[in-house]
Every structure is written in structure tokens, then in C-alpha cells.
Image: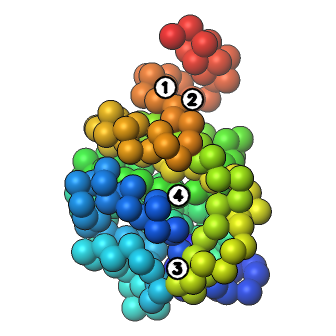
């Protein structure tokens, strides 16, 4: 999950567990065009992988049909970036290139990055059942779980496929109805969620 970046803690390349890599590929009909946060231990095997220091996924092109991202969850103090920057790129690529994107991120529903780039923007969310998702550390399953709940966020036009593939892994919430709302108003959001 660090994509080779040095963050606030000891640096590791935290990789996506195999079951989720397989599920992502199933949603994308067998292949992932871009992994903008890859590392030398990744099992994602996207057609194009951005790996630091040669390729910075935040500055390279995201003009790809299918994108999978497991972004750094911490901050990169040297670059002044956080997960917010990665979610902004997800949302921008979906809007600009009509990319289908899946992002494995911590559940942080009250943050500005969820408010601006997930709620009212993404298609659906799978709140994963894994109590402590076991990331691969430097390519190996070391049995340690993440200290937070995680979700798979989907930006794309094939909600039914996402639902069918990911329903075994968590609770799926279709948030497409939020696209028409002013996300600055919690009252409007609450009303819309419970009226449909």
C-alpha cells in the first residue's frame, strides 16, 4: 500500500490479497490496464504499472480503460500527498476518460476525501467483511491484519457486475442516487438515502 513511498511508519510494500486481485480482474473481464500504485512485490500484474521512483502514479497518465489502485494509506511528507490525492485521481480519471476504477481504501466516511471523491461521485462501495484485512507485506502473507476496516470503491458503469463479484466479500451499497445531490448538505444526503 505504500507503493514504495516512505510514510510515517517503517516502509513496506503492502500488497492486495490474492482473493481481491482475482475479484478485481473478474469485474474487469480478466485484466487490469493500470496499477498506478504498484511495487516490485505486487501480484496485481496490471498491463501498465507505475512504480516509484521511476514512475509516480500521481503525475503519470491515467488514460486507461480499467484501473485498480491500492493507494498509500499514510501521508508522504516529502511530497505533501495523502490518500486524498489518490482518490481525486480516481474520480478525475473516471470523469475524464470514462475509466472503470476499483480502489481498496480504509473506511473513513467522515473525511473530506470521501465527501468530495466518493459520495456523489463513485458508483458503489463494498464494505469488506474482513475484520482486519490481511495485506501482503513485501509480497508475503505474514498474517498481520490492517488496523482499520477497508472498502472497495467502484467508479464505473457496470454496477451489476461489481455487485455479483463483490457481494461475497462484503456489504454492497449502490450510491448512484447521490450523484444528483449537493454533497455540502448533510440534510439533503440523509433525506435522499432514506427515501428511496
Identify the element where label 4 is drawn: strand
Location of mark 4 (residue): 104
> Which residue in the rendered view is the most extreme toward the top?
195
Q: Are marks 1 and 2 in contact (CB under 8 Å)?
A: yes
Location of mark 2 (residue): 183
Instruction: Please tell me the numbered disc located at residue 3.
Output: 3
Q: Going by the image, does 116 lie left or right of 12?
A: left
First of labels 2, 4 by sequence position: 4
Instruction: Name the residue: 46% across, 68% down.
Output: 18
Location of mark 1 (residue): 178
Instruction: Name the residue: 52% across, 68% down.
Output: 17
Kindly indicate the quadrant of the structure image that contains residue 10.
bottom right
Kindly report the distance in space between the C-alpha atoms of the residues bearing marks 2 and 3: 31 Å
Q: Nearer the viewer, mark 2 or mark 3?
A: 3
Tell me where residue 135 appears, x and y as whole percent.
60, 70
Q: Going by the image, does 107 lie left or right of 13?
A: right
Kindly report the distance in space between the C-alpha atoms of the residues bearing marks 3 and 1: 31 Å
Kindly report the distance in space between the C-alpha atoms of the residues bearing marks 1 and 4: 21 Å
Amino acid at each position: 500500500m505504500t507503493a514504495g513511498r516512505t510514510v510515517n511508519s517503517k516502509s513496506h510494500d503492502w500488497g492486495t490479497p490474492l482473493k481481491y486481485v482475482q475479484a478485481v480482474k473478474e469485474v474487469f473481464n480478466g485484466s487490469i490496464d493500470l496499477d498506478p500504485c504498484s511495487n516490485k512485490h505486487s501480484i496485481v500484474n496490471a498491463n501498465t504499472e507505475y512504480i516509484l521512483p521511476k514512475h509516480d502514479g500521481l503525475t503519470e497518465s491515467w488514460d486507461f480503460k480499467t484501473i485498480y489502485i491500492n493507494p498509500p494509506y499514510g501521508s508522504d511528507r516529502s511530497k505533501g500527498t495523502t490518500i486524498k490525492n489518490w482518490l481525486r485521481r480516481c474520480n478525475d480519471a473516471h470523469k475524464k476518460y470514462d475509466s472503470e476504477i476499483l480502489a481498496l481504501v480504509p473506511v473513513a466516511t467522515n473525511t473530506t476525501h470521501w465527501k468530495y471523491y466518493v459520495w456523489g461521485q463513485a458508483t458503489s462501495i463494498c464494505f469488506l467483511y474482513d475484520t482486519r484485512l490481511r495485506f501482503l507485506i513485501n509480497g508475503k502473507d505474514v498474517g498481520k491484519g490492517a488496523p482499520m476496516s477497508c472498502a472497495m470503491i467502484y467508479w464505473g458503469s457496470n454496477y451489476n457486475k461489481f455487485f455479483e463479484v463483490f457481494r461475497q466479500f462484503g456489504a454492497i451499497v449502490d450510491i448512484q442516487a447521490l450523484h444528483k445531490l449537493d454533497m455540502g448538505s448533510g440534510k439533503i444526503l440523509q433525506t435522499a438515502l432514506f427515501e428511496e
